């Protein structure tokens, strides 16, 4: 028996097992393993068609099938189906709902390349509805929360964030910096995180067995970025999500804040707190947070003063406050040479940074970048981040022209060895763009993205604009110098966190004002 024939038999056996027990996640996981090993695309196509005919399209089995298909076919139309099915499943399984939110968010971030597509994909996946159901369930099940009281001044702030992770995790850095800035304004701060991105038993709750691994938070390793002595409360990983949230609400109630600040895209913990306290939201993306807040700190002046309804009828009370400050310029811990980075001394170096570059650098855009490199043999493209995996689209490129590095602790020094920052077409990348701006690099990025929000009018509106600007920067030293200086000035005047204190306090005051308005009984 040939090895190919043997694998085909195993695949068919796993298919039969899955059809016999479609509500069992271990069957789908076994099927995934043999499906990924199969080389015959016709057999795989017939298998998918057979599964669609022979397995349920609703309930837990339908949900497992849809998440499996989303992963195996890399097709987010199945993600939307999974969201619709999950929203209708009763009784509620909070862990499965939370696992899907993590799974869907990660997939959508890796597949979309702008804010408009991101928002649409989030809505298509029933993300707002599922989160709202989870929030309602939590609010009804857990009674612990701060007692309602009159608040006249903001003196204590509880910062809620989905996850505190290891250095140099950008969202954790943002959370710590917000705490530092509030403390510098004379406010007492405590941090609360329920480890929302690591759901217990997550692999068993999804069809393809995905899970999330995050580094543990260590205040010592964050050094001066972590305010000394700050109270930090983290969920216990062995508890269910409801167990974690219940514990954390008790800790928040004991702290008794005057205001809650939510840092992140979403956290179910915020909804019950919204009932009793003013809430200020800071999303790590440039769209409105998917959490009930009184005021959200928007990166774009176009969103300021607007009551947003981006996520539907569940969230209509928040208003935007223009607050573009996002990044503190990191000190260069030590100088780094091009030789240490294995970069040619005489090359013109492009740099891109991020955790998901191996997925984001793909398709037609990657082809255009390859063509550009081939027409400029003196150009080297440095990719930094994550585990340093070479994108599949670039595997045939010369190592003299494409260099890959894993995540680096001393990014300012790395940027100083480079000439142009190149932001791929993606929703994210805003933190890396801002860090490059701080070091005086010219930036090429698309508009309608986190990175585009950082550079304003200089963002490219389409591929022609993008590659024309990049080509011009490559051939002109003067243009690079002028653009780099302009980016550094823009960072200093609009993005530097160290200048954000007065704006942040004003946003807190506005949140209190709106909270007072929504909780004061109307007397006729």
Image (cartoon, grey):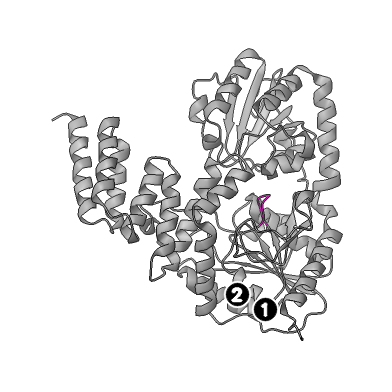
Q: Which residue is mark 2?
A: 272
Number of numbered labels in the structure image:
2
Q: Is residue 183 left or right of residue 90?
A: right
Spot occupied by residue 269 in the image (x, y as percentages of width and height):
58, 69
The correct choice, above or below, for 448 with respect to 103 in the image is above
Q: Going 21% across and 30% down the picture, which residue do you hit?
A: 4
The C terminus appears in which quarter of the rendering? Answer: bottom right
The correct choice, above or below, for 102 with respect to 408 in the image is below
Which label sits on residue 276?
A: 1
Measured in 3D between alpha carbons, the distance from the residue under mark 1 to the one under mark 2, in whole angstroms, is 8 Å
Find out whether the residues at labels 1 and 2 contact each other: C-beta distance under 8 Å: yes
| 10 Å crowding of disc 2: few (<14), some (14-19), many (20+) | many
Q: Going 29% across and 46% down the picture, which residue do you hit?
A: 52
Q: Is residue 138 left or right of residue 427?
A: left
- State which quadrant residue 466 falls in: top right
The correct choice, above or below, for 273 with respect to 381 in the image is below
- State which quadrant residue 161 falls in: bottom right
Q: Which secondary structure class fits the magenta region best?
A: loop
Magenta stretch?
A: 283-288
Q: Going 53% across and 42% down the picture, which residue do you hit?
A: 110
Q: Nearer the viewer, residue 401 or 306?
A: 306
Q: Going 52% across and 46% down the picture, which residue do you hit?
A: 108
- State which quadrant residue 259 falls in: bottom right
Q: Secondary structure at mark 1?
A: loop
| 10 Å crowding of disc 1: few (<14), some (14-19), many (20+) | some
Spot occupied by residue 307 in the image (x, y as percentages of width and height):
72, 60
Q: Secondary structure at mark 2?
A: helix
User: Does the magenta run of residues contain 286?
Assistant: yes
Spot the residue most to the left: 1
Spot occupied by residue 133 in the image (x, y as percentages of width and height):
50, 68
Spot occupied by residue 127 in the image (x, y as percentages of width and height):
52, 57
């Amino acid at each position: 028996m040939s090895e190919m024939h043997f694998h085909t038999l195993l695949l068919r056996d796993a298919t039969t097992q899955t059809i016999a027990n479609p509500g069992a996640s271990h069957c789908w996981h076994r099927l995934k393993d043999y499906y990924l090993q199969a080389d015959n695309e016709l057999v795989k196509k017939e298998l998918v068609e057979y599964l669609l005919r022979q397995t349920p399209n609703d309930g837990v089995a339908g949900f497992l099938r849809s998440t499996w298909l989303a992963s195996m076919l890399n097709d987010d139309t199945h993600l939307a189906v999974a969201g619709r099915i999950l929203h209708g499943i009763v009784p509620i399984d909070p862990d499965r709902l939370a696992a899907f939110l993590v799974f869907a968010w990660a997939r959508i971030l890796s597949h979309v390349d702008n804010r408009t597509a991101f928002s649409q994909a989030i809505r298509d996946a029933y993300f707002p509805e599922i989160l709202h159901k989870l929030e309602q369930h939590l609010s009804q099940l857990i009674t612990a929360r701060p007692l309602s009281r009159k608040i006249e001044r903001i003196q204590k702030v509880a910062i809620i964030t989905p996850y505190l992770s290891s250095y140099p995790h950008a969202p954790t850095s943002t959370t710590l910096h917000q705490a530092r800035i509030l403390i510098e304004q004379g406010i007492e701060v405590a941090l609360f995180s329920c480890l929302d991105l690591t759901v217990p038993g997550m692999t068993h709750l999804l069809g393809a067995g995905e899970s999330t691994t995050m580094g543990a938070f260590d205040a010592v390793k964050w050094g001066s970025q972590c305010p000394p002595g700050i109270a930090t409360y983290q969920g216990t990983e062995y508890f269910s999500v409801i167990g974690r949230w219940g514990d954390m609400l008790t800790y928040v109630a004991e702290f008794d804040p005057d205001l809650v600040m939510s840092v992140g895209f979403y956290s179910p913990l915020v909804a019950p707190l919204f009932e009793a306290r003013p809430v200020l939201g800071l999303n790590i993306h440039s769209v409105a947070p998917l959490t009930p807040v009184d005021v959200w700190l928007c990166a774009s002046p176009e969103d300021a003063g607007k009551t947003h309804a981006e996520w539907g009828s569940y969230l209509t009370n928040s208003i935007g406050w223009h607050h573009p400050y996002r990044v503190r310029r990191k000190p260069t811990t030590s100088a780094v040479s091009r030789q240490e980075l294995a970069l040619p001394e005489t090359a013109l170096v492009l740099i891109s940074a991020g955790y998901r570059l191996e997925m984001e650098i793909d398709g037609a855009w990657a082809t255009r970048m390859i063509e550009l490199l081939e027409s400029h043999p003196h150009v080297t493209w440095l990719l930094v981040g994550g585990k340093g995996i070479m994108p599949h689209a670039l595997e045939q490129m010369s190592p003299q022209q494409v260099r890959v590095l894993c995540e680096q602790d001393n990014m300012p020094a790395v940027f100083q060895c480079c000439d142009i920052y190149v932001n791929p077409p993606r929703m994210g990348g805003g933190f890396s763009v801002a860090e490059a701006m701080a070091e005086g690099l010219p930036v090429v990025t698309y508009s309608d993205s986190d990175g585009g929000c950082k550079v304003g009018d200089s963002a490219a509106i389409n591929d022609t604009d993008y590659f024309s600007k990049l080509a011009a920067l490559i051939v002109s030293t003067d243009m690079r110098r002028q653009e780099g200086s302009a980016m550094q000035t823009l960072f200093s005047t609009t993005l530097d966190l160290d200048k954000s204190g007065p704006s942040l306090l004003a946003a807190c005051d506005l949140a209190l004002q709106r909270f007072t308005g929504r909780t004061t009984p109307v007397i006729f």
